Amino acid sequence: MLLTLNKIEEYMLPCMWKKTFNVECMGCGMQRSIALILKGDFVAAFYMYPAIYTLIAMFTFLLFHLKFHFKNGHKIILGLFILNISIIVISFLIKTF
C-alpha cells in the first residue's frame, strides 16, 4: 500500500504533551506543517508552524557544513539555532496567551 500525500495525516504521531496536559507544546504543528509543505501549501505550512522554514535552512546548512567544513560555519549554525529558538518560543507564547 502506497502512502499518498492525501492520507499522510492518518499516520501522524499524537502529541503526548497535549494529550496529557491539554496544552500544546512548542513542537505542536511541525508534523502538519511538513505535510503541508509536501502537499505544496507553503503559506499554510508557515501559519501552522512559523519556524519550519528556518529549521529547514538550519539543518540544510548543517549538512553542508558537515560535508564541506565552512570556515565560520559554526557561527552561522549558532545564529540559526538562536533564531529558531526565538521563533519557536515567541510563536508558542502567542498561541498560548
Image (cartoon, rainbow, N blue to C red):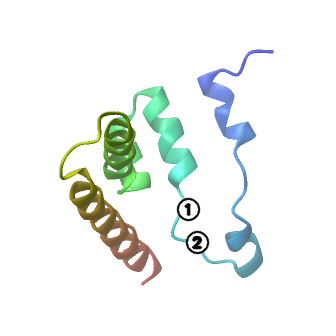
Where disc 2 sits, the SS reads: loop
Q: Amino acid at mark 2?
A: Glu
Q: Amino acid at mark 1?
A: Cys
Question: Which residue is pictured at 36% across the width and 45% down the height?
Answer: 62
Label total for image: 2
Q: Position of residue 66 (x, y in %)?
A: 38, 41
Where disc 1 sits, the SS reads: loop
Q: Residue furthest top?
A: 1
As drawn, 44 above or below 24: above
Question: Which residue is pictured at 29% across the width and 41% down the height?
Answer: 69
Q: Position of residue 31 (x, y in %)?
A: 57, 47
Q: Residues within 10 Å of mark 1 (few under 14, many from 20)?
A: some
Q: Position of residue 4 (x, y in %)?
A: 65, 20
Left or right: residue 32 versus residue 64 is right
Whether residues under marks 2 and 1 lie with C-beta atoms below 8 angstroms apart, the answer is yes
The quadrant in which the N terminus is found is: top right
Q: Quadrant of residue 75?
A: bottom left
Question: Which residue is pictured at 48% across the width and 28% down the height?
Answer: 39
Quick one: 61 or 3, which is closer to the camera? 61
As drawn, 41 above or below 5: below
Marks 2/1: CA distance?
A: 6 Å
Which residue does the numbered mark 2 point to in the structure image?
24
Which residue does the numbered mark 1 point to in the structure image?
28
Quick one: 12 or 74, which is closer to the camera? 74
